[in-house]
Image (cartoon, rainbow, N blue to C red):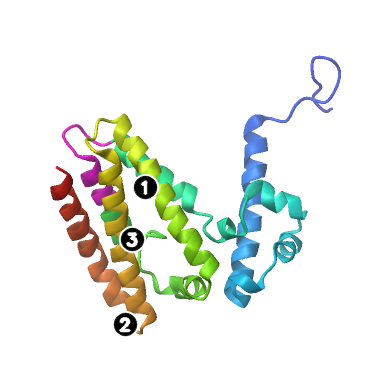
Amino acid sequence: MADEGRHGGPAAPNPGRRERKKAEVRQRISDAATALFLRHGFDQVSVSEIAEAADVARPTVFAHFPRKEDLFFDRYPQVAGQLTQAIRQRPAGTSAVSALRDTLVAAAQAGQAPYGMQADMIPWWRTVAASRALQARARELADQLSAELAAAMAATGTAEPELAAALAVAAYRTVHLQAIRCILAGEDATTVAARHPDRIRSALSAVGQMTA
């Protein structure tokens, strides 16, 4: 017998279940979009095609991803959350930039996407390289991340938080893009991945010295 609400109607869905179903739909849309983008190129795929592949209505796609580019950069909220948490929960006596450095280095060493330099990411990077729209959105997200990190730094007492965040994001982005360019130019991904954590550590340590 189905559960009923206090007034005799069907009981409201469990909030946890509702959120799980929402996450499942979001993931299904993201997976369908990524597969199409990697197969055909970002600019050649329409939102309607993504909706059809994910078996959802077109408005449902936009309910989860306001912009088409956000379907490709679907991990941004997770990345921003992980890095702001590292700042907010850093141990006493550890600077915000040092907390970022340690988090980014550990993620790169573990090969965690999108921080690592895994060879299986090459098609993803090539897709970005072929699309001006994706490159523009990546720059926007870098600015957005800088603002979010600055807010976390300000909330936890970092001096000059906007400057520290901007320099940290710029340093990491430069190292990350250099590594990607090396791989796309034909350098062995394993070799690039092996030196990537040390390059992140060096770049963020320099920022830490400048903002101390």
Total marks shown come to: 3
Q: Which mark is residue 146?
A: 1
Q: Residue type at mark 2: give it.
A: Glu
Residue at mark 2: 187
Q: Give the SS element for disc 3.
A: helix
Please determine whether, in this image, residue 140 is positioned above or below residue 18: below
Q: Give the SS element for disc 2.
A: loop
Residue 37, position as x, y percentages in the image: 60, 70
Q: Give the SS element for disc 1.
A: helix
CA distance for labels 2 and 3: 19 Å
In the image, taking residue 63 as reference, residue 103 lies left or right, namely: left
Residue at mark 3: 173
Q: Residue at x 84, y 15 (%)?
A: 7
Q: Alpha-carbon neighbours of circle 1 within 10 Å: few (<14), some, or many (≥20)?
A: many
Question: Closer to the N terminus: mark 1 or mark 2?
Answer: 1
Q: Nearer the viewer, residue 118 or 210?
A: 210
Q: Nearer the viewer, residue 65 or 212?
A: 212
Residue 98, position as x, y percentages in the image: 21, 46
Position of the C terminus, as image quadrant, is: top left
Q: Alpha-carbon neighbours of circle 3 within 10 Å: few (<14), some, or many (≥20)?
A: some
Q: Which mark is residue 92?
A: none
Q: Residue at x 52, y 65 (%)?
A: 134
- Mark toward the viewer: 2 or 3: 3
Q: Which residues are magenta?
A: 90-103
Q: Residue at x 30, y 64 (%)?
A: 174
